[in-house]
Image (cartoon, rainbow, N blue to C red):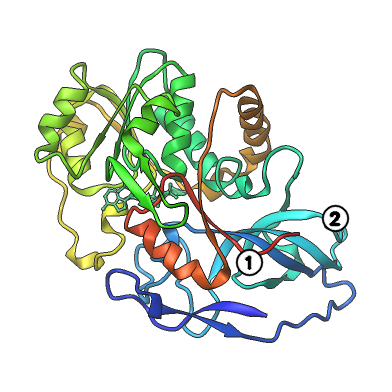
């Protein structure tokens, strides 16, 4: 069984040598009564939070660091090939955390939930119909409290969470603008240029979008795109973008704090402070962090709602697919550097 092992902690940016493919034994024995489940991995999810878990320091982490010499743990969609669990049966499809490899043994079936291949492509349970989608829904509805006519801004707008939250905000009647890291991206996997800014507007219904790397003064840029100010800022990146947003946030504005991508590849001690915080006080802004795992009890309701939108063509999704377990590290580094449009997934095997 090939597995992806963490062999060293990255210093700042992840490099391919931090991870290594190793052939390891998997204990196929399912002791009666233990509830263990043996899985064949079909799709693996590539997520920014994995970078958090690749550091020794426990400070500031909501999940434990990965251990050196052990496989990394990722969310995956898998097929059940053996089971001693009362409710999970051979031949069914499940999503949930696994030690990343061609096969995985999940003790007691912990964290697994069944997924329906007839509702959507299986890989969608790692994106639109999985944690990133639920993240978008929870942050928008429970913290953002969108109303028709609200001015809505999202950073990392072309990513797994960003694509969903922008469309959900549109369905709530907001005016939606997103920022992305390039006008176009060359995908070495499908050999085409993807015109991100245009795609966001034409395919995904954004009212506007801009390339933050081409803008010199983000304060002025936001003034241009939001002459009426910003009511909701869905925060994915932190740092200087947050500083600029704070100067444009409206009275009683809301900032669901989803992620702070701009700091993930730096040492925690080297982070710069954020200026303009006085706006939070003066404009009575609600700024609140949230973690998707605290909202998993909403997952089945969310899936029914969004699968309906998907069927009716009210919501669209896009994936950035890489082939093969051996390319997991490449795909992860590419995502952290912004090489993706849509949810990054690695295709490991077919059922
Ligand atoms: P994405 O698919 O959006 O991929 C990451 C993207 O971030 C890249 O494509 C890149 O796009 C952008 N990016 C990378 N570095 C920077 C930077 N320094 N400044 C601005 N943008 C940058 O990832 P996800 O959709 O999975 O995650 C988006 C955010 O949501 C992350 O912050 C993540 O941690 C957070 N998250 C939070 C959860 C929670 O429970 N709170 C759950 C899931 C995700 P580009 O530069 O082209 O814009």
Front residue of 344 and 249: 344
Residue 135 place in picture, x, y as percent: 49, 42
Q: Name the residue that disc number 1 marks.
A: 98
Residue 149 figure quarter: top left
Left or right, 131 with reference to 80? left
Q: Which mark is residue 187?
A: none
Q: Which quadrant: the C terminus?
A: bottom right
Which residue sits at x=46%, y=28%?
Answer: 167
Q: Is residue 124 visible?
A: yes
Q: Name the residue that disc number 2 marks.
A: 87
Left or right, 1 with reference to 186? right
Residue 93 figure quarter: bottom right
Q: Which SS class for mark 2?
A: loop
Which residue sits at x=14%, y=39%?
Answer: 215
Q: Which SS class for mark 1?
A: strand
Please tell me whether residue 153 is drawn above or below residue 276 in the rendered image: above
Residue 346 place in picture, x, y as percent: 55, 60
Choose the circle earlier in sequence order: 1 or 2: 2
Residue 12 figure quarter: bottom left
């Amino acid at each position: 069984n090939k597995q992806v092992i963490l062999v060293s902690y990255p210093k700042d940016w992840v490099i391919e040598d931090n991870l290594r493919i190793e052939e390891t034994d998997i204990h196929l024995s399912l002791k009666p009564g233990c509830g263990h489940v043996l899985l064949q991995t079909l799709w693996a999810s590539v997520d920014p939070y994995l970078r958090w878990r690749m550091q020794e320091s426990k400070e500031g982490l909501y999940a434990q660091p990965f251990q050196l010499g052990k496989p990394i743990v990722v969310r995956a969609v898998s097929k059940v090939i053996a089971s001693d669990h009362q409710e999970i049966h051979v031949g069914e499809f499940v999503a949930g955390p696994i030690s990343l490899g061609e096969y995985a043994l999940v003790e007691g079936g912990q964290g697994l939930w069944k997924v329906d291949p007839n509702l959507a492509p299986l890989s969608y349970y790692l994106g639109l119909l999985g944690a990133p989608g639920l993240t978008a829904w929870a942050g928008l509805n429970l913290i953002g409290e969108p109303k028709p006519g609200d001015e809505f801004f999202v950073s990392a707008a072309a990513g797994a969470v960003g694509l969903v939250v922008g469309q959900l905000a549109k369905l709530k009647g907001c005016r939606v603008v997103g920022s992305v890291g390039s006008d176009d991206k060359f995908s070495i996997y499908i050999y085409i240029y993807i015109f991100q800014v245009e795609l966001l507007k034409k395919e995904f219904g954004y009212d506007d979008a801009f390339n933050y790397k081409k803008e010199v003064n983000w304060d002025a840029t936001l003034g241009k795109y939001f002459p009426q100010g910003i009511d909701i800022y869905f925060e994915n990146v932190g740092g200087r973008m947050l500083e600029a947003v704070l100067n444009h946030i409206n009275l009683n504005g809301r900032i669901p704090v989803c992620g702070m991508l701009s700091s993930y590849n730096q040492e925690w001690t080297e982070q710069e402070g954020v200026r303009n915080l006085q706006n939070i006080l003066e404009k009575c802004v609600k700024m609140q962090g949230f973690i998707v795992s605290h909202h998993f009890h909403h997952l089945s309701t969310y899936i029914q709602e969004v699968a309906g939108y998907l069927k009716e063509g009210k919501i669209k999704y896009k994936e950035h697919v890489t082939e093969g377990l051996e390319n997991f590290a490449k795909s992860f580094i590419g995502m952290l550097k912004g090489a993706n449009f849509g949810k990054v997934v690695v295709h490991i095997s077919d059922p």
